[in-house]
Image (spheres, helix red, strand yellow):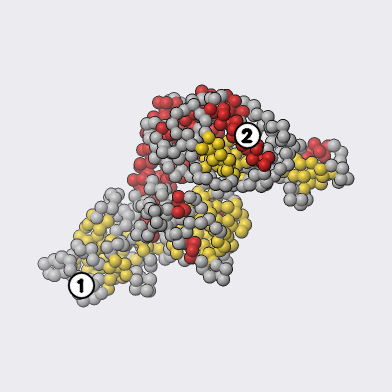
Amino acid sequence: MAFMAMLSISASAFAGSVDSQGYPLFYLRGSFQGSSWNGTELPFSRENDVYTIHVNNLDGEFKISNDDWTINYGASNGNDTEINSSVSRIGIFDGFNFIGHNLNDLTISFRYVEGSNEAAISFSVNGQQPPVVDGPGSGTLPILYINVYDENGNLNNEIISKDLDHKNYFSGDYWLDLNGCEWMEAEGAKSIGSKEDPLPLQIKARGNWTRKGFSKKPFKLKLDKKQSMLGLSKSKHFAILAHADDFFGYLRNFTGFNLGRRMELPWTPDQQPVEVVINGDYRGLYFLTESIRVDSDRVNITELDDNVSDPALVSGGYLVELDNYDEDNQIWMEEKGQAGGFKDTLRITFDTPEEYSDIQRQFVTEQFTAMNDAIGDNSDSLWSYMDMDDAARYYIVEEIVSHTESYHGSTYLFRDYGEGQKWHFSPLWDFGNAFMGPTDDYFSNYGPYGNTWIASLRLNSKFMDKVKETWKWYMSQKFDGINADIDTYINHLKAAARADYERWHDQPVPDGGQAVADNRNLDGAAEYVKNHLRQKTSWLARQWGDYNGYFAEPTRDTTPAAPLPSYIISGVDEIAAIKNEGTEVEIYNLQGMKVASPESGSLYLIRAKDGSSVRKVLVK
């Protein structure tokens, strides 16, 4: 059964060319044989008043028009909406969506009736009904529905204002419709909630430039309870990233995260594409992303509370960001180093915990001062504070994608609790300037920002030995397959990318901002990215070594960690050891609640039942 729509034709106003019998000439305009949109037109054949055309390999959006492009289309959704063909194509618009990607053996026909304003248009693909979407978006990806309410229970559309520039939370609810997405279902993804039974959440705008500069804004989600959203790690905390500034086919974060997971860094976020509707308004293609959190499934370190002053606790864990914005919760120091070039202020932003007591601030300041001084002296003492292996792995990923903003903002390090711990570069986040650097030089030689420490780190011989060892292992054992992953990924996104363009291409932008990126040509973007990776890895092979053959994973650096300062007590004991002392004990969490089964990696209070002693311990 062919799909039927209503084509609105104003015969009396028709001003196009006619054939010898006075019938109007009609054309199919679009892209064919995989070419990009260029206004290509093919004429319909006519038999009496029936117009028909048969094409193979129609790729992308298309429309039917006369030679003056003046025909309007009416959506078959019962409201007689008409879309002017000068700004819309048979493709994506309200009422129904015709997905025109890689349609082979396509026949389009309609009957023209002189003096009539309507004619039935039919499409058939291989004799079958083509993909038709009854609802928002492309119909090819899950849809995340979010409703946001004011204090009176009414929908609050401030959340979707192009001028929203604050980070205040809004309350609302959500449901996630898998929407028949078979490839995600095969990965174990499931729908969550429903329109009739939504689940509570809080939502706020996130980001800095991406929040203020674009109508399509990124958001932070805080769910009422932990969920495994689309197969991602179970949590209350996710981001839906707009990638409104990613004109590389939404491939910046995807490629960086993919390479990070292949590199086996301690934890690298994952993401899934999803189309978003907020307060009934289709918002386009987003990327549901695991937020950076201290958690057993994410940054797996001991979570330290705000404003802790007990010297037995303050050695960790800490998650910090090297930031490029001035904030209140920061430690500042001037970058040192042997390399030339611009050196920026180090802004060490508190992530977890978010607020430091005096002793916490003192400890973190001393730790970063020691690392900064060691980089300035090109000293091997650096590796008493910084994990060399993760520093090398993190850097290789950032260099492969030529990410000119890395080591300037969104650069995270963590340190776990206790003796023997170091600072680790991880997790990777926000590849917003990936592929902007050269393919024949180091990105920091061309970056417009101060790329903290990395130029001086390249002067450290032990670091570069580790980089070269890790590079050969990584490229010989882990890198292969990234191109296939890119191809699979963009094929999942093509229809949604066109829907996103239709949603945003003609929308107003915030003052001083810019238009949302046009990513309809995903094949072209993918080829650009793959070519960048090919050229950059070829150049790096000439700098860091040929990786043909088999190279084993390098052994971890064994430089001992610097001892804790005298004002900090390690406080590390084993519960089993305490029980072996012969005294019955009770176990409490730091909030004073009794715990029957303590979890590994968490801090607890251990109290003797006779009240003779209380200790703070870390369960290993």
Q: Is residue 212 above or below residue 396?
A: below
Q: Earlier in the sequence, mark 1 or mark 2?
A: 1
Counting labels gives 2
Query: Residue 79: percent from the left, percent from the top?
Result: 37, 74
480 sits to left or right of 561: left
Specify the farthest residue to the right. Answer: 610
Report the residue at 37% width, 44% height from top.
Answer: 526
Q: Which residue is mark 2?
A: 366
Q: Quadrant of the C terminus?
A: top right
Q: Amino acid at mark 2?
A: Glu
Q: Is residue 356 above or below residue 423?
A: below
Camera sees residue 584: no
Query: Residue 116: percent from the left, percent from the top?
Result: 24, 76
* Secondary element at tag 1: loop
Query: Residue 272: percent from the left, percent from the top?
Result: 49, 51
Q: Quadrant of the N terminus?
A: bottom left
Q: Is residue 131 above or below residue 518?
A: below
Q: Amino acid at mark 1?
A: Ala
**Marker disc for residue 13:** 1
Report the residue at 23% width, 54% height from top.
Answer: 40
Count neighbours of disc 2 (C-alpha within 10 A) and say few if under 14, some if 14 to 19, many if 20 or more: few
110 sits to left or right of 241: left
Q: Nearer the viewer, residue 517 or 260?
A: 517
Report the residue at 42% width, 41% height from top.
Answer: 434
Query: Residue 486: percent from the left, percent from the top?
Result: 42, 44
